[in-house]
Image (tube, grey):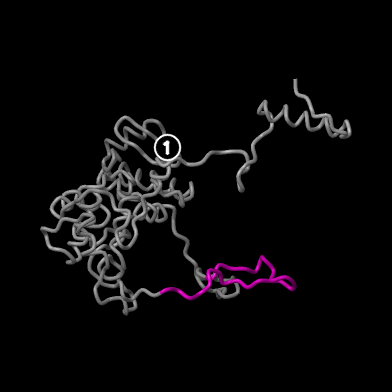
Amino acid sequence: MFRFPNLAWPKRILMALALAVLLASSGLIAKPKPAGHYGYGKAATAAEIAGWDIDIRPDGRGLPDASGSVEDGEMLYEDQCAACHGSFGEGVGRYPVLAGGEGTLTEARPEKTVGSFWAHTSTLFDYIRRAMPFTQPSSLSAEDTYAITAYVLYLNDLVEDDFVLSKETFAEVAKLPNHGNFTPDPRPDVDAKRCMKNCKDPASVRITSEPTILAEEVAEDTPVKAASPQEQGAEVYNGACAVCHNQGVAGAPKLGDKADWEKRLSAGEETLIKHAIEGFQGQSGFMPAKGGRMDLSDTAVAEAVKFMLAESIN
């Protein structure tokens, strides 16, 4: 039994003190939360943080313990990269050119490649590791990433054919030829100015990086030719679909393979379009939603499918 000393305290205070002692001893009083805690979630574990902490710094900090040679990279590049970037890094269609372009940065149409424009090899390694190959991003092992990075450097005449890239040799190629031409950008992050009164009408605001053509700027007699659905489909195909459907990557039906397309069309054109938009796992391959190009509209994907059907069956 809890007893208070024989003091002349008011009975109300004594009762409050007794209640506080009982609650504290029973654990019913919640412990104070640390600053910034809102009562939900939990602190990330070291293993969870490590899963996201994969960025590579310009000095090579963060590189995994592995290595890859130019020789191994050549085979991997041909298998995983050449369909988009060309066997010599020359680029296919609208996919990026990776090699060449030296001395073109001052021209009207500069060719920005790893060798002519990029500043750090860490950017190349990090991007390959996170985003490549196009149809299966983040599927390459550390060894594969080292090897492909080494081969792209070789395509740009930055290393010899016997070079092996690793944490130990990274410093030799950490800075790329155009490194010295990169300077900090002194401009602010926004183009807008603060406004508290007499503000601009929001409807008149335009994105300054994209040209805006107003109706009054176009002469009434100027003929405007709209692209046909077939032309629109061909443009989407060349920009987003050709990388898989030209080569049959991941089980994709090749453009012009009538038998394969007729088999898939047996489910109906609407179903085929639905699979292209939403994604589909078939018996012979995998179709990611919109081919991984989530910036495309459903209509654009549908026109691309119709284009492929027309080119393959009709």
Q: Residues within 10 Å of mark 1 (few under 14, many from 20)?
A: some
> Is the C terminus in the top left, top right, bottom left or bottom right quadrant?
top left
Q: Is residue 101 magenta?
A: no
**Secondary structure that dominates the magenta span:** loop
Image quarter of residue 239 = bottom left
Looking at the image, residue 207 sits to the left or right of residue 93; the answer is: right
Please say if 136 is above or below 280.
below
Looking at the image, residue 116 sits to the left or right of residue 309; the answer is: left
The outermost residue toward the left is 162
- Give the residue type that dot 1 points to: His
Please say if 12 is above or below 208.
above
Looking at the image, residue 38 sits to the left or right of residue 297; the answer is: right
Please say if 311 is above or below 101.
above
The residues colored magenta run 184-208
- Name the residue rendered at 30%, 40% in the picture: 252
Please say if 152 is above or below 7.
below
- Name the residue rendered at 45%, 48% in the picture: 294
In this rendered view, identify the residue nearer to me: 215 or 14.
14
Image quarter of residue 91 = bottom left
- Name the residue rendered at 67%, 66% in the picture: 202
The outermost residue toward the top is 1
| Residue position for label 1 | 275
- Name the residue rendered at 25%, 50% in the picture: 145
Element on which disc 1 rests? helix
Q: Position of residue 156 (x, y in %)?
A: 20, 65
Looking at the image, residue 18 sits to the left or right of residue 186; the answer is: right
In this rendered view, identify the residue nearer to me: 161 or 180.
180
